[in-house]
Image (spheres, rainbow, N blue to C red):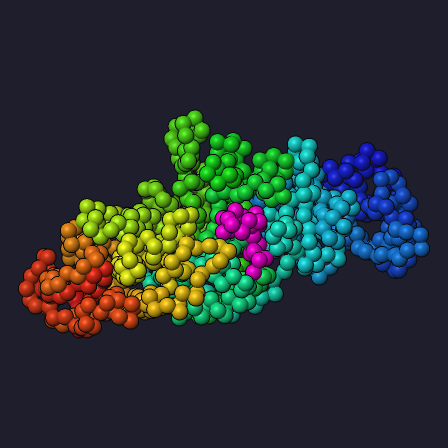
């Protein structure tokens, strides 16, 4: 009956792998049951039996109290009893359920799938799961010598709550009666290295508001109202649909607004601007606001800076009800070194690769996941599924893919280790990405998986079964870089760099592309999109309007970072947010009016999106006018109605230009970025039509003579139904 003092010593020191073997109810084979309870510092302890009778428990050693009761005093099945304690002379008595009478909360199938790295709903097994009687806690710490649960429910002293190891799975588990939603907790991990560190739960569904770092027990009470959206999503093919994405850093869109306010104000703004999707910079909890969310410490918890997890659910729900898709930046490439988070979780490299040549990122001072470890790969894939399924996210933009697929990324000679075949490719990361896309698309048809991949890695958007990585889209960083480099130059110099503005069409159909004018282009001294344009104020705004109209007509889906829609002049600041007061000024109102017009025209014209990923959807009219700084091209859609885009990136007008068109007759001027209502000069006088004569030009059977406004873009379409290109 009396426990071994050495075993109790290990137990109270937090280094016992199976506290339930000592504590709880243990039949002695002679018709009795030995009850043992861990109540450090208790003065008196009694076992309260189901019939209400009380049995005094004697202190054995190290805070362990024992009693023997007849087996007949306990009902068949799991033993039922309570523990009553006092801690001071004449002090109050507390009566509580005993954690150590409860069986494991994870079954054999859960443990098998975790060990195999195939538990696609890992968040349902690990983490903190509250129920009517208490909360089940489970954490993966395979190298730990012991794990104790600490929290505000035990005065942050884990002595009374050691967890048990569930064998070779590496999982530690404990059910704690009486603990419910809102409780704060961490795991005190006694590491393989002999150290002790208090760790936030990697699977926590909620976290404290930074700079506090505890995990929070949470259970969602949100009732979704987007069934129609979710059902329609299953059949969508985004390559053949319009996609105009508004990229948002939620904490700084309007600083001070939480999820609840954003569910009204942001939704209305996006709907008024005509964007089809929003893309949020990472919302998973992160300690440093200046990382914009890219240094994640709690992968399963939306940031508490803006409210509760259900507040974020409501925001997504409202966006869906407004017909707006929701994309999320997701960061599987690296994680920060904060000692209380994932780094050396069990006292050794656990989530990170053990070789610093693969496990540390030289650019960001962070750690790199071990993509070859099955449990780590499972953690990441389950996390992606968690956002898609628990928060109804419509797609993930996977951050920094290039840093994942190359072993020598940002590393010099001798700082990286070749793969098994002597190459620079990270074979484990490649397999992880293929598995990620396969599983996410299998479980959630109709979602968008987009890669931020800045190199020429082949087959990023090729299906996995054809040897690709399986993404649906890739950010076109080459288009972004070349276009902005061209437009930074004074128009008098652009003639010598015309290839920068036309080169994108050489590879436009090598992948399925998104054209990004993202947050990365308006920070760190790069200047805002407005101030990348040379010249005086008028020229800058005209150049910005021309950039947007050119972008919306170019093959590929569209993405614009917040503030871009009003032509913000300053770089983005995550503290100051968008300078909404600029809308008091006409040029900025003109940019917003143009963005509204672009999205409205775009949505209604399949020529601009239905064949984005097919070469047949594009034809040059004239891409070689370097001296004039002009471009002219056609877009064709499934409806057979062409659209002509005529671009003048010169600061002077071009009058009397003959431009080839696919058919004669009247053509409607859909858009003129030089229109006075956008802040332009009105050079063309607002003419709404041009007449195309049956006079061949630029290899096309018809042509029209028209005037191109300075730093302006015209969109034309036949005034009657046209034939397919």
Q: Which residue: 50% across, 42% down?
A: 334
Between residues 243 and 25, which one lies in front from this camera angle? 243
- Which residue ends up furthest to the front in the rendered image? 536
Residue 107 percent coordinates (x, y): 64, 49
**Residue 572 lies in the magenta-colored region:** no
Residue 287 percent coordinates (x, y): 57, 49
Residue 196 percent coordinates (x, y): 69, 37
Q: Which residue: 72% across, 48% down?
A: 150
Image quarter hosting the C terminus? bottom left
**Would residue 318 be found to the left or right of residue 468 on screen?**
right
| Quadrant of the rendered image containing residue 237 | bottom left
Q: In this view, does 164 lie above or below 177?
A: above
Q: Which residue: 76% across, 42% down?
A: 19
**Residue 288 lies in the magenta-colored region:** yes
Between residues 373 and 554, which one lies in front from this camera angle? 554
- Which residue ends up furthest to the right in the rendered image? 90
Between residues 91 and 449, which one lies in front from this camera angle? 91
Residue 638 makes an appearance in the image: no
Q: Which residue: 20% across, 72% down?
A: 686
Residue 174 percent coordinates (x, y): 71, 48
Magenta segment boundaries in residue numbering: 285-306
Q: Is residue 578 above or below residue 193?
A: below
- Which residue ends up furthest to the top in the rendered image? 414
Image quarter hosting the N terminus? top right
Residue 676 makes an appearance in the image: yes
Between residues 248 and 614, which one lies in front from this camera angle? 248
């Amino acid at each position: 009956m009396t426990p071994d003092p050495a075993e109790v010593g290990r137990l109270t020191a937090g280094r016992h792998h199976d506290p339930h073997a000592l504590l709880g109810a243990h039949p002695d084979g002679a018709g009795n049951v030995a009850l043992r309870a861990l109540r450090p510092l208790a003065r008196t302890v009694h076992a309260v039996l189901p019939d209400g009778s009380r049995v005094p428990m004697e202190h054995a050693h190290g805070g362990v109290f024992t009693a023997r009761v007849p087996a007949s005093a306990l009902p068949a099945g799991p033993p039922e009893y309570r523990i009553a304690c006092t801690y001071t002379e004449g002090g109050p008595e507390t009566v509580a359920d005993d954690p150590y009478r409860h069986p494991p909360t994870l079954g054999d199938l859960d443990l098998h799938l975790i060990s195999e790295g195939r538990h696609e709903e890992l968040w349902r097994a690990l983490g903190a799961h509250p129920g009517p009687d208490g909360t089940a806690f489970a954490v993966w710490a395979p190298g730990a010598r012991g794990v104790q649960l600490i929290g505000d429910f035990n005065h942050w002293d884990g002595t009374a709550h050691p967890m048990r190891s569930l064998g070779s799975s590496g999982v530690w588990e404990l059910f704690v009666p009486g603990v419910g939603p809102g409780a704060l907790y961490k795991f005190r991990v006694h590491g393989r290295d002999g150290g002790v560190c208090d760790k936030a739960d990697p699977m926590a569904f909620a976290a404290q508001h930074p700079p506090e770092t505890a995990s929070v027990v949470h259970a969602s009470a949100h009732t979704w109202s987007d069934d129609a959206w979710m059902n329609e999503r299953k059949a969508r093919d985004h390559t053949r649909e319009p996609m105009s994405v508004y990229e948002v850093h939620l904490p700084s869109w309007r600083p001070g607004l939480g999820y609840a306010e954003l569910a009204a104000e942001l939704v209305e703004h996006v709907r008024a601007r005509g964007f089809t999707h929003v893309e949020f910079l990472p919302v998973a909890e992160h300690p440093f606001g200046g990382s914009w969310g890219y240094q994640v410490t709690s992968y399963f918890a939306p940031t508490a800076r803006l409210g509760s997890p259900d507040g974020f659910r409501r925001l997504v729900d409202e966006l869906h009800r407004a017909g707006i898709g929701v994309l999320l930046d997701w960061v599987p490439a690296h994680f920060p070194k904060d000692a209380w988070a994932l780094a050396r979780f069990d006292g050794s490299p656990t989530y990170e690769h053990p070789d610093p040549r693969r496990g540390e990122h030289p650019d960001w001072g962070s750690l790199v996941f071990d993509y070859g470890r099955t449990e780590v790969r499972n953690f990441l894939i389950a996390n992606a599924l968690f956002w898609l399924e628990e928060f109804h996210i419509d797609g993930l933009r996977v951050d920094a893919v290039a840093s994942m697929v190359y072993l020598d990324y940002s590393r010099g000679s001798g700082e990286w280790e070749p793969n098994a075949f002597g190459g620079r490719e990270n074979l484990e990361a490649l397999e992880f990405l293929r598995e990620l896309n396969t599983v996410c698309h299998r479980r959630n048809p109709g979602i968008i998986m987009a890669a931020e991949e800045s190199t020429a890695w082949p087959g990023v958007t090729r299906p996995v079964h054809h040897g690709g990585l399986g993404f649906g889209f890739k950010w076109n960083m080459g288009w972004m870089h070349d276009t902005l480099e061209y437009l930074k130059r004074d128009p008098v110099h652009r003639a010598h760099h015309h290839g920068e503005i036309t080169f994108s069409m050489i590879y436009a159909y090598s992948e399925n592309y998104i054209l990004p004018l993202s947050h990365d282009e308006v920070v760190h001294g790069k200047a805002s999109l407005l101030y990348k344009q040379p010249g005086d104020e008028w020229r800058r705004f005209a150049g910005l309007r021309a950039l947007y109209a050119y972008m919306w007509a170019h093959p590929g889906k569209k993405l614009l970072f917040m503030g871009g829609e009003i032509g913000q002049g300053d770089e983005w600041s995550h503290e100051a947010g968008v300078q909404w007061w600029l809308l008091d000024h006409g040029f900025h109102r003109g940019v917003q009016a143009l963005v509204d017009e672009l999205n409205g025209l775009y949505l209604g014209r399949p020529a601009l999106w239905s064949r984005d990923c097919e070469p047949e959807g594009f034809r040059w009219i004239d891409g070689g006018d370097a001296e004039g700084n002009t471009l002219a091209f056609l877009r064709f859609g499934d409806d057979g109605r062409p659209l002509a885009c005529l671009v003048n990136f010169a600061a002077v007008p071009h009058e009397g230009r003959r431009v080839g068109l696919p058919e004669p007759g009247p053509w409607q001027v859909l858009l003129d970025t030089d229109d006075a209502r956008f802040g332009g000069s009105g050079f063309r006088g607002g003419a709404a039509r041009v007449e195309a004569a049956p006079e061949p030009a630029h290899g096309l059977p018809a042509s029209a003579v028209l005037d191109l406004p300075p730093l302006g873009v015209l969109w034309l379409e036949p005034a009657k139904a046209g034939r397919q290109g």
